[in-house]
Image: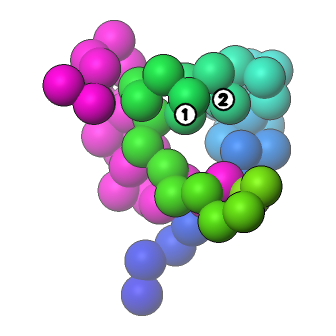
Amino acid sequence: MQEFFTPQEIAKTLKVPRKTVYFWLQQGKLKGVKAGDLWRISQTALDDFLQNPHEDKEN
């Protein structure tokens, strides 16, 4: 089963502000799933982002 993280957990892990993680999600740089007001990021999406942090995932 795939593990999912909250934006807060990603921010703590990467040592960046939580707002930065939300910005990456909104810009499509970090892929996540939104359910209502809650974002969740899979381990795979985080790994992809860390491999290519400057790539826009929407295009």
Q: Residue furthest bottom?
A: 1
Describe the colour scheme in one phrase. rainbow
Q: Which residue is mark 1?
A: 25
Q: Residue furthest left?
A: 59
**Residue at horizontal 63%, vertical 21%?**
23
Q: Secondary structure at mark 1?
A: helix
Which image quarter holds the N terminus?
Answer: bottom left
In-image side of 59 versus 37 (left or right): left
**Residue at horizontal 42%, vertical 43%?**
31
**In whole angstroms, how far apart are the C-alphas of marks 1 and 2?**
6 Å
Residue 24 position in % (x across, y down): 55, 24
In-image side of 16 versus 41 (left or right): right
Q: Amino acid at mark 1?
A: Leu
Q: Nearer the viewer, residue 39 or 5?
A: 39
**Residue at horizontal 65%, vertical 65%?**
35
Q: Which residue is mark 2?
A: 21
Which image quarter holds the C terminus?
Answer: top left
Q: Secondary structure at mark 2?
A: helix
Q: Are marks 1 and 2 in contact (CB under 8 Å)?
A: yes
Report which quarter residue 48 is drawn in: top left
Q: Nearer the viewer, residue 15 or 59?
A: 59
Residue 47 position in % (x across, y down): 36, 44
Q: Residue furthest front?
A: 36
Residue 26 position in % (x across, y down): 56, 29
Q: Is residue 44 magenta?
A: yes
Magenta-colored span: 39-59
Q: Is residue 32 above or below residue 28?
A: below
Q: Amino acid at mark 2?
A: Val
The reply to whether residue 9 is visible in this rendering is no
Q: Is residue 44 above or below residue 3?
A: above
